[in-house]
Amino acid sequence: MSDKTNGKNVPDVHHALLCARMAASVYTAKKNINTQEKTMEEKVELMKGNEAIAHAAIRCGCDGYFGYPITPQSEVLETLTLLKPWETSGMVVLQAESEVAAINMLYGGGGSGKRVMTSSSSPGVALMQEGISYMAGAEIPALIVNVQRGGPGLGTIQPSQSDYRQATAGGGNGDYNVIVLAPNSVQEMADFVDLAFQLAFKYRNPAMILSDGVIGQMMEKVVLPPLKPRRTEEEIARECPWAVNGHGLKKRKPNILTSLELDPHVMEEKNLRLQKKYQDICDNEVRYETYLCDDAEYLMIAFGSVARIAMEAIDKLRQNGIKIGLFRPITLWPFPGKEIARISQQTKGILVPEMNAGQMIIDVRLAVEGRTPIRHFGRLGGIVPTPDELADSFNKNFIHNA
């Protein structure tokens, strides 16, 4: 899927990055990353989020990338092509004929025990949903990166968060879940590549990095992970005894990876086993971050780039004497519902800002169970909210109407 514009009425992409820049200095200070203390093995670079994905993929021992260009994530494939990892680590980089072809290449590569990945943006990931469902059903690990843009349909090339429900509730058929990580910095774009692969292979499940056009296109300092060699065929055979790789056939029966089962009783047992695995993930892999929540009487709950903007809005509100904090889900699935339920007991109200019409707020409401008022603020179609807009929305909903 490619993108073309006629040059008329196309919003300046720099506007989409403006709000993130406004919060960038505040965010960096909060993180307090002293890059001078990093070892020489850890390489510090200034790069886009999309470029960080590409560099991290090579450095974490990825075996293959299969993708197709689409704005705003095309730099992932472009950077991999410039770096030519096939000449160094032996990593395969292939531009597929379509997103459908790419996801089926992941099925084959992941099924052989290889660390394989793809990246796309919203319409392209929509085309991959059948393949992702097949991979979940066959328990094939792989990494999918979605740098979201506005929709529905072809929509716009500007940033959005409108694929939340697709990613967390399963965009394909059947009862399945994908592990979903939501970065809010270029650093996390790099860090989450290896983490996503680790989780995917630990649980034999597809994993997704759900980013957006702000994080994909903005530039920040990033500490790239240390170089890690690709696994040998012997290591894969030992670590992935389920893999369809031809190794060990003298010692085992052939492995078969499929999501198809015609016997309903057997299929029910498989579904029950999958549900147990998903529960194990929920019990062990929830990740989140809090900011100024210890004394907070109000909360903003936001993910990705909007969480950065919310952080500055919270600082503004704090200056006016309002005790408010930020809760940022890092894993969108598994969702930190228990943690939100616990922290909501001390709050008078929750604002959920998103770049969509109201998607994560559904999970927040399920977690809070009516204990405190919840309001939504959303910008649609590729518009990025400002810190002032978030602060004004909070005041309108919880202070002026109190």
Image: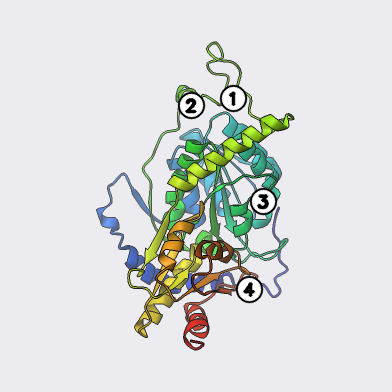
Side (left or right) of 277 relative to 60: right
- Indicate which disc residue 171 carries: 3
Q: Position of residue 340 (x, y in %)?
A: 45, 62
Among the two numbered marks 1 and 2 on one chain, the one whose residue lies closer to the N terminus: 2
Figure check: 45 above or below 394: above
Apparent side of residue 301 relative to residue 34 in the rendered image (left or right): right
In the rendered image of this protein, does residue 153 appear above or below residue 399? above
Instruction: For marks 1 and 3, give the one nearer the viewer.
Output: 3
Mark closest to the chain's N terminus, 2 or 4:
4
Q: Which residue is mark 2?
A: 236
Q: CA distance from mark 3 to mark 2?
A: 30 Å
Q: Which mark is residue 244?
A: 1
In the rendered image, residue 94, in percent from the top left (x then y), is placed at 61, 40
Q: Which mark is residue 11?
A: 4
The residue shown at (55%, 50%) is 76
Q: CA distance from mark 1 to mark 2?
A: 11 Å
Separation of disc 4 and disc 3 at Cα? 29 Å
Q: Earlier in the sequence, mark 1 or mark 4?
A: 4
- Helix, strand or loop at mark 1: loop
Give the label, 3 or 2, closer to the camera: 3
Location of residue 16 (image quadrant): bottom right
Instruction: Say which quarter of the image contains residue 195.
Output: top left
